[in-house]
Amino acid sequence: FGTMSENELLEICGSCEQSSTHPVAESIVSYCKDIKLDNPEKLTEIAGHGISAVLGGKNILCGNERLMKENNLTFPQADNIASTPVYIAVDGKVEGIIIVSDTVKNSSPSAIKQLKDMGLYTSMLTGDKPSNAEIIGNQLGIDYVKGGLLPDEKLKEINNIRKNKGAVMFTGDGINDAPVLAGADVGGAMHTGADLALEAADAVFMNSEPESVVKAKKIADTTLRISYENIIFALAIKAIVLILGMSGHPDMWLAVFADSGTAMLLILNSIRILNIKKYK
C-alpha cells in the first residue's frame, strides 16, 4: 500500500531485525537470506513494540500495531487473523506490512500433554495478538492463554497464577521475557535467546525443543525424590545406631558404618541421577 517494492521493504525490515533475537525477527531475517542487508546507523529495540532505527539516513520503525499507534501513524489492519503483522514505516509513513504466520513445532503437542499428565497447569503468555494466541493455545490444549501482553503485564499474570496455582516456572527467550524470567520461581531460557533473557534465567536449555522442559521436570522430580530418600535413610541409620548405643551395645565398626558407610551408600544412591537416558 506504499510506494516501495517488496524487495525494498524486506531489505529495510531485514536490516533492522537482524540484531534482534525475537522469533518473528529471526523468521524475517531467515527469509531475507538472499538479500543484501545493511547495518543501521542507530537502532533501539523497544520491548513489546518493535524496533526504531536510522538506516541510510532515514527514520525506520518496524513493529506491531502498538508501535505505529504510539507514533500516530495510520495503517491498514491485517486481514489474516492467525498471523503476526510487522509494519514498516519510513520517515513517518507506513510503507508496507510483512505477515508472519505462526507454526507449531512437531514436538510441542507431545510436550504439553506430558506436562499435563504430570498434573501441571499450563499457560501461555505472549505479546502476540490475542486471536493468534487463542488459536495456538487451542491447538496445543493449553489451560490458560493470554495474548497482547507487555513485559510488565506478563509479570502481573505470573503473580496471579502463583497466587491461584502455586510455584511457577516460566520459559522464554526474548528480551521481553527477561522481567518474567527473573520474577518466576524458576526461569528457563533457550540458549538461542537474548543475552538479557539468559542472564535473568535460573536455567538455560541447550536446545529449543519444548520437550527439554519435560526432561528438566523429570530430572528435578528424580533429584528431589533421591534427596528425600537420602535424608530418610541417613536419619534412620543414625537413630538405630543411637538406640543400640544407649541400650548398651556400642561397637566401633557399627559407628564407622553409621558415619562413613552411610555416606558411601548415599553417594552411590545419588549417582543414579546421572543416568539421563531414562529421561529421554
Image (cartoon, helix red, strand yellow):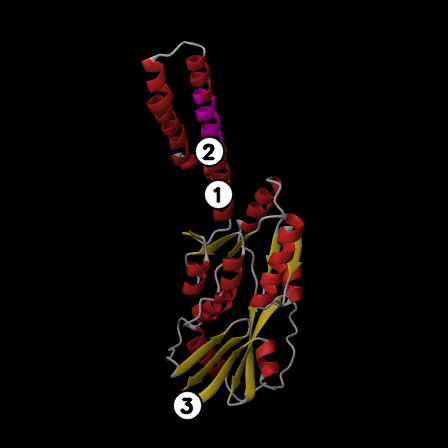
Q: Secondary structure at mark 2?
A: helix
Q: Are the residues tagged 1 and 3 within 8 Å (C-beta)?
A: no
Q: Are the residues tagged 2 and 3 within 8 Å (C-beta)?
A: no
Asked whether 141 or 198 is in front, the reply is 198
Whichever of labels 2 and 3 marks the residue nearer the N terminus, that label is 3
Q: Secondary structure at mark 1?
A: helix
Residue 44 in picture, x, y percent from top left: 45, 78
Q: Residue furthest top?
A: 248
Nearer the viewer's eye, disc 2 or disc 3? 2
Tell me if mark 3 has few (under 14), some (14-19) or many (20+) residues whose alpha carbon lies within 10 angstroms of its own.
Answer: few
Residue bounds of the magenta highlight: 227-238
Residue 24 in picture, x, y percent from top left: 51, 68
Label 2, label 3: how many angstroms apart (C-alpha)? Answer: 61 Å
Asked whether 116 or 234 is in front, the reply is 234
Q: Which residue is mark 3?
A: 57
The kind of residue tagged 3 is Gly
Q: Dividing the picture into quarters, in which one does residue 263 lie?
A: top left
Asked whether 77 or 114 is in front, the reply is 114
Residue 269 in picture, x, y percent from top left: 40, 28
On screen, residue 12 versus residue 119, left or right, reads left
Q: Which residue is mark 1?
A: 215
Tell me if mark 1 has few (under 14), some (14-19) or many (20+) residues whose alpha carbon lies within 10 angstroms of its own.
Answer: some
Q: Where 127 falls versus 7 (above or below)? A: above
Residue 184 in picture, x, y percent from top left: 54, 55
Q: Are the residues tagged 1 and 2 within 8 Å (C-beta)?
A: no
The kind of residue tagged 1 is Lys
Q: Which residue is mark 2?
A: 227
Q: Secondary structure at mark 3?
A: loop
On screen, residue 254 versus residue 247, left or right, reads left
**Residue drawn 43% across and 68% down?**
30
Nearer the viewer's eye, disc 1 or disc 2? 2
